[in-house]
Image (cartoon, coloured by chain):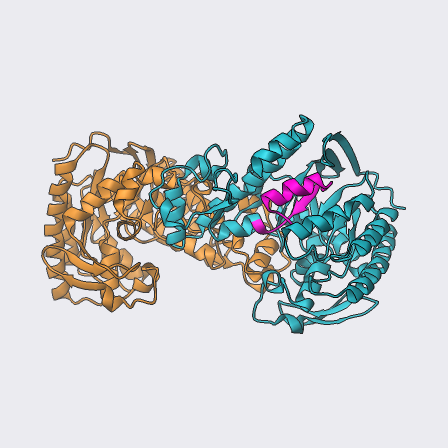
Chain colours: A orange, B cyan
């Protein structure tokens, strides 16, 4: 099994009334306190902000997408730079996904149009074939054909050099039936074993590997998949695939999955990033989250705020006319660059005038907001006040 | 006459072989060393970068456009913030133009499509009427009609609160004939007197007023206009209007204009920002320049470099395929955030992938480049090496 000698996950505090836990994940690029949020530098760059902005806003960890980096600029150019950390100038922990989510989203439709970055090519044309070996897909950049296998995904991710890397899985969508979901899950398990074998072959101590739980919305399949992932030599465990049709079902799926995971290993919930979702996820053992939501929302004028300030909502829309002459900050009490230096009226005006720096300012705020939220959660756990603090946010 | 008691322009060094001079322009927001370059925050925001980026890159002074701020968000909202400095978070010197250039560009065509920010409305429809009183134009934002007079321009600029403000003039285009240019110039002179009277009426010591020289490409008209501006109680002098059809004619126009200007007052050359243009301008007595060129160029992939590095050109195009695997910085020796942290290959990739942060990184470089260029020029003058250093740049 891999030694993971440069990695360690220490659970230091536990909430007495739930499964919430405070931990420290040691990586070659520093210690990551958990619970925490992972920001998406999908194509090897954050949208609207520099990595310096990210650092200044307090971000602890970011991710890039293997699928995008594979297609353009290619992993070899990144390797020539010494890996993603050097390429995009980030010296804290990083994660890369396996590429599975994007490829199968493209094939299955669904969230594809949000992900692929090129809406002119229809999703049906992108995924050509899935078989036991892997998947054949068309590049969204130039239409050329590519094959991705579990082994190649690990090879690409090794060149990208993120601290945390993921196995290749097939990401089944919400509308898959039980029969397809089960067969796909079993193939994913075989791919995960191949991923692990390939990881061990090239292991240089710089990376750790997470398995991914599939099984859709079916409790017995989630149990089987979680047990599989927990039994293999993965450093960490990610929950992927369809989490159902709404927030309630999502937490049902999470709650009947995590009991079967390895209790001493970190757990990542893929693609979830709402404020209440994070509070609920932490209560269900989740240590890390990632989602484009905070940064995408910002580019469309949405500023995250404490739900008490947002009249129950988790954000305000700065484009709303009521902010036209509002000389207050985006969120009172926030210590971010945007809130410290600009008014709601100014940011409102920037969106009206189509000045893109408005999106930059809100992105900075939303990053800072997520960092403060994660810190609030960690401190609440450490101080034995998780339930009390959670209540003020729900 | 205005006291301009919070302003002072001290010429401290002169080049022995040309008219180049080193000066310090004292303003309520600090001292501005000249020669210097003014960056364009046209609509009250820089494109692609925050004012923090500008500060970090070493920018000393920025401008906003009265025309744009008048139409949206309106000067009263800016005044409610305490002026442009507070609105956009900039505590160093600022300049606003009078709005004339934009309004008349819209009417006369020419550079309008570059300026108005809305290419769907044709330039012909924008300027409805010019008469002795002022101009009536259509808002590019919502099509509503507005009247701008010399008095109103000063009033708006007082609300905007920049340190340096400009008189309203009619900006005659290159294709104007002599007769039109002369009549327009004389009306501009009458408007400049009205601007000065309005300025004096509301003078609170926080601003200084520059006159503008018109007269197109005609030596006798430029002489007449420069003499007029020099004879009035302006703090500074700007050279506006058509500077001819090419770089050579531009310096002819400048060289037969500046001898008639007031030798102790600062001289600004409107809308010029090429590297060699600045060296030539400084030699013709110009103290400050402004142009969207460095920042617009960056957004299109152009990175300013020393002409010796650009094989005679003043920039490289990072989108060029030859930079695809170039692990060097944008410009060797540059101390900007982009050059210190990212490779040409990375920035090339960002433009290929349509990641807008590529434009941000090049904008930071180009701002830093212009600041370093201005500093090089100032030091060359102070060290008595202007001609020698200029040669290495031509």
- Magenta-colored span: B272-293
Residue at x 74% of width, y 58% of height: B216
Residue A6 located left or right of residue B112:
left
Of residues B240 and B391, the one nearer the viewer is B391
Q: Is residue A286 magenta?
A: no
Q: Is residue B357 above or below residue A176?
A: above
Name the residue at 73% across, 65% down: B176
Looking at the rendered structure, the number of numbered marks drawn on it comes to 0
Q: Nearer the viewer, residue B201 or A80?
A: A80
Q: Is residue B9 left or right of residue B346?
A: right
Residue A153 at least partly seen: yes
- Residue A285 occupies quadrant: top left
Q: Residue at x 47, y 51 (%)?
A: A306
Q: Quadrant of residue A108?
A: bottom left
Between residues B72 and A278, which one lies in front from this camera angle? B72
- Residue B275: in magenta span: yes
* Residue at the far top in the pictured view: B383
Q: Quadrant of the C terminus of chain B?
A: top right
Q: Of residues A350 and B309, which is closer to you in this image? A: B309
Classify A29 as above or below A145. Answer: above
Query: From the viewer's perspective, is B2 left or right of B242?
Result: right
**Residue A157: percent from left, percent from top:** 23, 44
Residue A305 horizontal/vertical position (percent): 48, 52
Q: Is residue B223 above or below residue A376?
A: below
Q: Which residue is farthest right?
A: B1
Q: Is residue A372 left or right of residue A214?
A: right
Residue A27 image position (x, y, % from top left): 28, 33
* Residue A133 x %, y %: 10, 55
Q: State whether residue B58 appears in this view.
A: no
On screen, residue B212 above or below B308 = below
């Amino acid at each position: 099994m891999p030694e993971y000698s440069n990695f360690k996950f220490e659970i230091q505090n536990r909430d007495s009334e739930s499964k919430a836990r405070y931990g420290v994940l040691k990586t070659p690029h520093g210690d990551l306190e958990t619970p925490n949020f992972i920001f998406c530098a999908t194509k090897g760059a954050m949208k609207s902000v520099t990595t310096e902005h990210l650092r200044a806003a307090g971000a602890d960890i970011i991710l890039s997408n293997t699928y995008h980096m594979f297609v353009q600029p290619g992993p070899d150019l990144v390797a020539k730079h010494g890996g993603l950390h050097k390429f995009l100038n980030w010296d804290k922990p990083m994660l890369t996904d396996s590429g599975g989510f994007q490829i199968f989203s493209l094939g299955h439709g669904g969230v594809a149009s949000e992900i692929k970055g090129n809406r002119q090519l229809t999703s049906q044309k992108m995924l050509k074939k899935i078989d036991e070996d892997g998947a054949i897909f068309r590049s969204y950049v130039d239409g050329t054909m590519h094959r991705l296998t579990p082994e190649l995904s690990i090879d690409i991710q090794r060149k990208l050099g993120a601290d945390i890397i993921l196995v290749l899985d097939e990401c089944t969508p919400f509308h898959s039936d039980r029969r397809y979901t089960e067969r796909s899950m079993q193939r994913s398990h075989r791919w995960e074993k191949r991923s692990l074998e390939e990881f061990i072959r090239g292991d240089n101590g710089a990376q750790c590997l997470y398995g991914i739980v599939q099984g859709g919305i079916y409790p017995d399949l989630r149990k089987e998949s979680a047990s599989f992932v927990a039994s293999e030599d993965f450093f960490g465990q990610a929950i992927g695939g369809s989490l159902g049709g709404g927030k309630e079902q999502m937490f049902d799926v999470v709650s009947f999955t995590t009991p079967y995971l390895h209790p001493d290993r970190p757990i990542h919930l893929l693609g979830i990033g709402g404020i209440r979702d994070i509070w609920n996820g932490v209560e269900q053992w989740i240590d890390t989250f990632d989602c484009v939501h905070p940064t995408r929302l910002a580019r469309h004028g949405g500023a995250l705020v404490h739900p008490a300030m947002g009249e129950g909502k988790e954000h305000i829309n700065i484009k709303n006319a009521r902010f036209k002459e509002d000389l207050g900050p985006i969120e009172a009490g926030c210590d971010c660059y945007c809130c410290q230096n600009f008014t709601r009226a100014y940011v409102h005006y920037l969106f009206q005038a189509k000045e893109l720096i408005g999106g930059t300012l809100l992105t900075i705020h939303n990053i800072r907001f997520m960092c403060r939220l994660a810190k609030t959660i960690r401190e609440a756990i450490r101080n034995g006040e998780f339930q009390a603090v959670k209540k003020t946010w729900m």
